[in-house]
Each structure stands twice: as C-alpha cells, then as structure tokens.
Amino acid sequence: MKPLSSCALFGAVRALGGIKDALILQHSVVGCQWGSLTFRYAGKPYDVRQASDVIYDEDVVNGGEKVLRKALQEAERIFAHCGAVFVVSGCVPNMIGDDVDGILATTEGSQKLLHVKAPGCRKY
C-alpha cells in the first residue's frame, strides 16, 4: 500500500468526512483507521464520526464478516444520531472475499447503510 499516492480508502474517508449526518465505519485493519484518522484530526478534531471494526489475523483466516456485523450493531447504538453509515472496505476484506453488500442488505436498523469499496491494492 502506498498511502500518500494510491490508497483509495484514505481518499474515500477524506471525501466522506464532510458529510454531516453520517458515520464512516471502516471494514479493514487497524492501520487503515490510524492512517485515515491523521487526516480527519487535522481538519475538525471535535467532529470525527469515524470508527473501525478492526480485522485481526484470525479474521483474515476465518473471514471478517462477523466483526462487521458486530460493528454495525455498535454503530446503531453509539452513533444513533447519524442517519447514514458509510462502510468503507479496504484491502483485506477485498482479498479474503467478505460479502459486505450481503451483510448490509440483511442488517436491520434505522440508519441507511452504504458500501464504499476502496481497496488500495486494486487498480481502478
């Protein structure tokens, strides 16, 4: 990954960060969350509506769909004031084949769920 020149996830997070009534939920590894937070804190650190489900090693082996489902439940509870959740998926869920769209289609709640595919390892 080349975060300053080709990471689509970082670009997606920067673009979506300006949408007021929405949460950015990253479905990726912890490094993506850390890296993208540096961009967010530089702007308006008091208005960071961003979270991550943090895919760990065992999730790479067994699939990250379980952690995404749990994160969506937590987002509904903690960020209930947000009308929408942008699930931004990075390199790892793309490589292991997580069915993010299928999970979003079967998740019930009051928030609108939108998937943004943003793996930096993919050529666009």
Image (spheres, grey):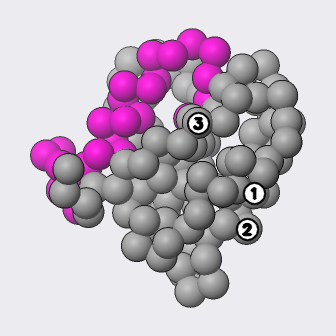
The region drawn magenta spans 1-24
Q: Of marks 2 and 3, which one's residue comes earlier in the chain?
A: 2
Q: Examine the structure image and report whether residue 9 is included in the region drawn in magenta.
A: yes
| View extreme (top): residue | 20
**Which disc, if any, is residue 69?**
1
Marks 2 and 1: CB-CB under 8 Å?
Answer: yes
Q: Of marks 3 and 1, which one's residue comes earlier in the chain?
A: 1
> Which residue carries the number 3 mark?
114
Which marked residue is nearer to the observer: mark 3 or mark 1?
3
Image vertical order of residue 77 relative to residue 3, above or below? above
Mark 2: amino acid? Lys
Alpha carbon distance from label 3 to label 1: 14 Å
Is residue 52 among the parts visible in the rendering?
A: yes
Mark 3: amino acid? Leu
- The answer to which image quadrant residue 21 occupies is top right
> Which residue carries the number 2 mark?
66
Name the image quarter holding the N terminus. bottom left
Image vertical order of residue 30 relative to residue 111, above or below? below
Q: Where does residue 114 sit, x and y in percent of width and height?
A: 58, 36
Alpha carbon distance from label 2 to label 1: 5 Å
* SS of the residue under disc 1: helix
Horizontal arrangement in the rendering, residue 118 relative to residue 100 (left or right): left
Q: Where does residue 6 sit, x and y in percent of width and height?
A: 18, 49
**Residue at image point 36% right, 29% down:** 14
Q: Examine the structure image and report whether residue 58 is included in the region drawn in magenta.
A: no
Horizontal arrangement in the rendering, residue 26 relative to residue 111 (left or right): left
Mark 1: amino acid? Arg
**Residue at image point 61% right, 23% down:** 22
Which marked residue is nearer to the observer: mark 2 or mark 3?
3
* SS of the residue under disc 2: helix
**Residue at image point 76% right, 29% down:** 111
Foreground of the two, 57 or 97 = 97
